[in-house]
Each structure stands twice: as C-alpha cells, then as structure tokens.
Image: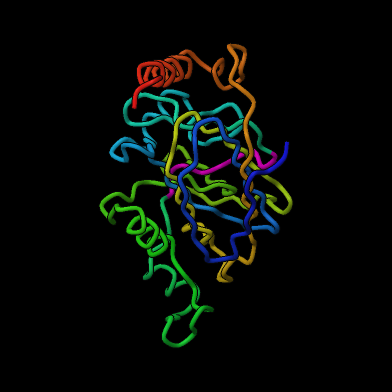
Amino acid sequence: MTALFTMTMQPGSKWSAHVGRGKSITLKATGDRANVSALFFHAQDPAERYNMPDTLKAQHTAFLTRGNILMTDQGKALASITEDSVGWHDPLSGYTTREGTDDKYGKTTYQDQRNDWLRSGEENFKVELFRNNLSPRDIGVPVNFFSKVVCELDGTMNYSLQETAERSVTLRTEMDMLLVLSNTPHPLDPSGQYPDASIVVSVADAEPVSDMDPCVLHCDENRRAFENTWNAYALLKGAN
C-alpha cells in the first residue's frame, strides 16, 4: 500500500487534518512509552463526534484494539481499527494538563525554553481546535493510542507499561473526519521523564469494506453503526 501522505510527530508536537472517508491512517511509534491522544469529529458537521461511552458500551470493552470501531454520538461508525501490533489502547483516562505536566516534569515555559518547553495535551488540543474553528468546549475524552490502563474491580485505574517501539495501529476512516492528534505523555504514566518517542503518521487509500469485514462482524452493534453510516452517505450521494 503506497502512502499518500507521511509525516513525523516529534515528542510534544500536535497535528490536525481533514481526512476523507476510505483512507487508512497508520500511527507507528519509534520508541517505548509512546502515547498519542486523539480527537475525532465529523468533518462536515463537527457537532457529531467520537463518543467514548457509546463506543465502549456497544462493544462491551474497556479498551480498544483490532476489530473495534469508534462510534459517533449519533450511532455511526466513524473509524475502524483494522490492524494493531500494540494490543491495547486506552479510551478512558483523558489528557495531560499544564498543571499536571509542570508537577510531574518540572515547570517549563515557552518564554524560557522556547521550542524545548514541555507541552500538555490540553494546550495542544486547544491550539488545533482553534485552527479548525472549534474551541476548548469541544475537547472530549480522547483515545490514548499505545497506552494501556487497567480498571480494577474497585474502580482504580492502573497504567501498565507495554512495548510500543516499532509497533503500530491502523485506522480506516468510515466517514470524512477531522482528526486532532497530540503526542504528549499519558496522564497516568508514573515516570518522571517526559517521553521521547516520535510517531510516524502515514495515510493511504484503504481497501473497500466488505460484508465479511472483521470490524463489521465484531458484534451486532457494530453492523448497525456501519449501516447507519452507509445509509447517511447513500442519502447524500449525488447531492451538491
């Protein structure tokens, strides 16, 4: 599969882009302790966006991996995880803040460290959302790719280190989307060292979705979400 687009996100960096339906987005980590926090919106109507509670409830899971899909708040399939050599991606824990980043890694500012200052997920999201005519009110719970968080029976959430170097996860876009990424630490990572893993982002054309697609067949709720998406695009076909 030939990539149409490739770029590398350095530690602490951010990126956003509109990605059309039927694309394959691969995120590959160059080192361990990688974490990429991601927000997803319907490109034409950002009021429709990735919905964590519905995604997890429908698929009876507390983590995401190959075969799972990301659902919108209107019950559509927004994106599918088609390949995954990591095995566990955290959808529960949120993102880092300025205060939390200063407390864990030491206070840094742009005025003092210039481009070497340590960025937080919250700040990165705000910047990229403003660039796309959205605001901090549009920040939701992201998917934290490459990070594993286990929920204990008493509700405790424990960060669990897993290998990420040279591992990757691939998403297939089922809708036109706005994708917002932040290569910033996981908020529950106990290490006091800011992660240094870069992330290579590659976008290519995806294979068409068939009725035997593993993401469609994963559960009845997934098929209904795909059908909602297919019907919505069928109604728009040919519209100006």
Residue 29 left/right relative to 193: right
Decide whether residue 86 is among the magenta residues: yes
Of 43 and 201, the residue lying toward us = 43
Q: Residue at x 37, y 35 (%)?
A: 51
Which image quarter: residue 18? Answer: top left
Q: In the displayed structure, would residue 202 be above or below residue 11?
A: above
Residue 21 left/right relative to 48: right
Measuring from the top left, give residue 52's x and y in whole percent.
39, 36
- Tell me which segment is drawn in magenta: 85-93
For the N terminus, the image quarter is top right
Measuring from the top left, give residue 197's x and y in whole percent.
64, 62
Q: Main secondary structure of the magenta part?
A: loop
For the C terminus, the image quarter is top left
Q: Residue at x 67, y 53 (%)?
A: 29
Q: How is the image coloured?
A: rainbow
Q: In the displayed structure, would residue 34 be above or below residue 204?
A: below
Q: Residue at x 57, y 35 (%)?
A: 23
Q: Residue at x 65, y 54 (%)?
A: 200
Of 240 and 29, the residue lying toward us = 240
In the rendered image, is residue 135 in sight? yes
